[in-house]
Image: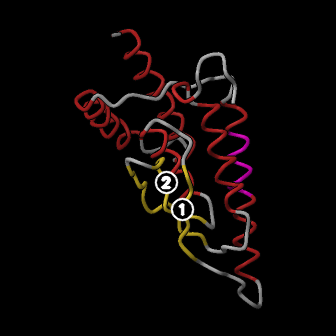
Amino acid sequence: MIFHRMTEVTILSVMAALGWAALSQNRGWWFFLPLWLLILVWQHLTRVTLPGLRLTALPGFLWFFSRQLVLGAFDVGWRALALQQKLVPGWQHYPLSLSEPASQRLLASMISLLPGTCSAEIEQQPDHPNQLLLHVLDQHTDWQAGVAALEQQLTRLLRQEAKPGIRR
């Protein structure tokens, strides 16, 4: 258990340091190191853990998500430059197939990063599966396919979501 926890902290620390170095052009370590120490203390006290990942699915997930970000940026740019705005905004419900609450929150957060959709709430009802309340910019687009594809990618990536021996 302690070895697993130390591995998580090490992986998280290396990822954060690489991210900081890339985003800050390898400057500002005087700010990052004390901040990171505070984050590690917070992580230890609150017992925040990383989800179990299938590392073989990580490249595919990163490719999918990066591609969606780029395509979404082009879509937003195209809409911004269009002479006539063809937006039909509205609220929509999306039934979740992810079973873990942490996975559902991760999906909701990632949907909000993609242009055209914004997660508002995970609705939990005892007699129905959990649903995600989304605000979409254009109800005439196939937003469901994009959300379903992201949910499927997360199912492949996160260990706790798929049953052993069954590939989704």
User: Which of the two residues, 81 or 60, is positioned nearer the viewer here?
Assistant: 60
Q: Name the residue under label 2.
A: 131
Label 1 element class: strand
Q: Residue at x 41, y 48 (%)?
A: 127
Q: Which residue is drawn at 68% across and 62% down?
A: 143
How many numbered marks have been drawn onto this rendered protein structure? 2
Q: Mark 1 points at which residue?
A: 93
User: Which of the two residues, 167 or 19, is positioned nearer the viewer here?
Assistant: 167
Q: What amino acid is found at the position of numbered circle 2 in the picture?
A: Gln
**Quadrant of res 94:** bottom right
Q: Is residue 166 rendered to the left or right of residue 98?
A: right
Q: Residue at x 60, y 17 (%)?
A: 164
Label 2 element class: strand
Is residue 156 a member of the stretch shown in magenta? no
Label 2, label 1: how many angstroms apart (C-alpha)?
6 Å
Q: Over which residues does the magenta segment extend?
A: 62-70
Q: From what the image shows, is residue 77 above or below residue 51? A: below
Q: Main secondary structure of the magenta part?
A: helix
User: Which of the two residues, 87 or 78, is positioned nearer the viewer here?
Assistant: 87
Mark 2 crowdedness (10 Å alpha carbons): few <14, some 14-19, many ≥20: some
Q: Is residue 163 rendered to the left or right of residue 37?
A: right
Ranked by sequence position, the earlier of labels 2 and 1 is 1
Residue 24 bears which disc, if any?
none
Q: What amino acid is found at the position of numbered circle 1 in the picture?
A: His
Q: In which quarter of the image is the C terminus?
A: top right
